Image: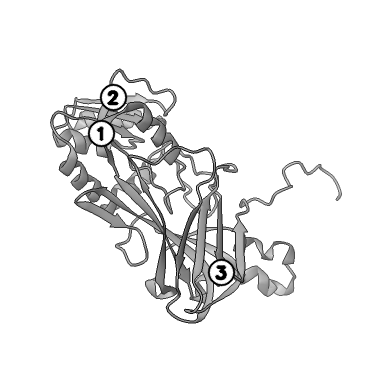
Amino acid sequence: MSSDKETDQDPGWQRMSYRDVAMHKVMLQDVVRTEAYEQAVAELVLPEHAVLDFGCGTGILSMFAARSGAGKVVAVDRSPFIKTAREIAQANGLDNIDFYHDDEQSLQLDEKVDVIVSEWMGHCLFYEAMLEPLLTVRDRYLAKDGIMIPAEVTLHAGLVCDEEVLEDLAFLREKPYGFNFSPIAQVPFEQSDLVTLDPESLLEATADLGTLNMHTVAKTNTPRVFTGTLRPDKKGLVYALCGWFSTKLSPGVAFGTGPDDLPTHWDQILFPLPQPFQVDPARELTLSISPLTEQTGKQQLWAWSITDGETTQSVNERHQAMQGQEDLPRGKL
């Protein structure tokens, strides 16, 4: 996650900006993420390769490429932090990295590259909204038979069966302090949340919602809808969906970000259901998660659903701020 995606106005999620050292420190300390990229770059980058690092952040992936012997490295980021990235490279004696303060539209290169490496993935893949810009760069600058790192990504979903995971969401439903908060009590159940889940909180069965081959996936201006099926391993109530991703960086390097995987800074995303959903092994379930292309302010919004063919629950996420209040006139209501 190394775009100029500012998150200062995103309550409850990342409150840091990509101009802040703290944000980059979090990602560098993610050993699963960073060492996997280091291994993939070492596996794939050859001395004759020109490498483009899109959304370079601190330049760590560019430095891996330079250390692996790449003939030329191009580091691109829309954030002014790229000036600091250049200073970091210079401090390490890496003078074959060219730094560009550009986005996918303004970038102008004279030649195509052999490898594009990018840590573009956000929470549940799409929180950063970097996929489409990356594909623009790929279509413009990746040479025929070029290499993409990562090579593919897969979105996964599970079923949360532990009611305690949603205990905090139910607070407003319980008439705190003796008052009825019904006008807003349902809102927390229509908003996603970043969580770190214990595997015991989920049913064993999970669904693969779709895999993107980063060499061939096409750009789109419409919401991508990811759908998969699973058969629950036992009867019970489901209170939320949980989303995460896995990625294959190279033929020899892969990792996941699910509850059963080693912890990463990506964690998982909780997608609450308005009401508990009864599941049964006799009924196959269809799960759907869609990152909405329209973002309100700084917040990525989602849509999600679950159905067993007879009963369906679906949610189009609300913005954290209540709608319809922006133009409220001054004075007595």
- State which mark lies toward you, 3 or 1: 1
Indicate the position of residue 276 as horizontal and vertical percent values.
59, 74
Residue sticking out furthest to the right: 332
x then y, percent, for residue 325: 73, 47
Gap between marks 2 and 1 measured at Cα: 9 Å
| Residue occupying the point 26% across, 54% down | 254
What colour scheme governs how the chains and residues are painted in the rendered image of this protein? Answer: one colour
Residue 197 showing in the rendered view: no
Label pair 2/3, CB-CB below 8 angstroms: no
> Which residue type carries mark 2?
Lys
Amino acid type at circle 3 is Asp
Identified at 15% across, 36% down, the residue is 67
Q: Which residue is mark 2?
A: 112
**Viewer-side label of 2, 3:** 2
Locate residue 45: give its quadrant.
Answer: top left
| Above or below 320: residue 147 | above
Near mark 1 (Cα within 10 A), the count class, few <14, some 14-19 or many ≥20, is some
The image shows residue 42 at horizontal and vertical percentages of 16, 42
> Residue at left 49%, top 38%?
220
Element marked by disc 2: loop
Residue 55 in view here:
yes
The first of marks 3 and 1 along the sequence is: 1
Residue indicated by mark 1: 146
Does label 2 or label 3 sit earlier along the sequence? 2
Q: Element type at marker 3?
A: loop
Question: Mark 2 touching mark 1, by CB under 8 A?
Answer: yes
Tally the numbered discs.
Answer: 3
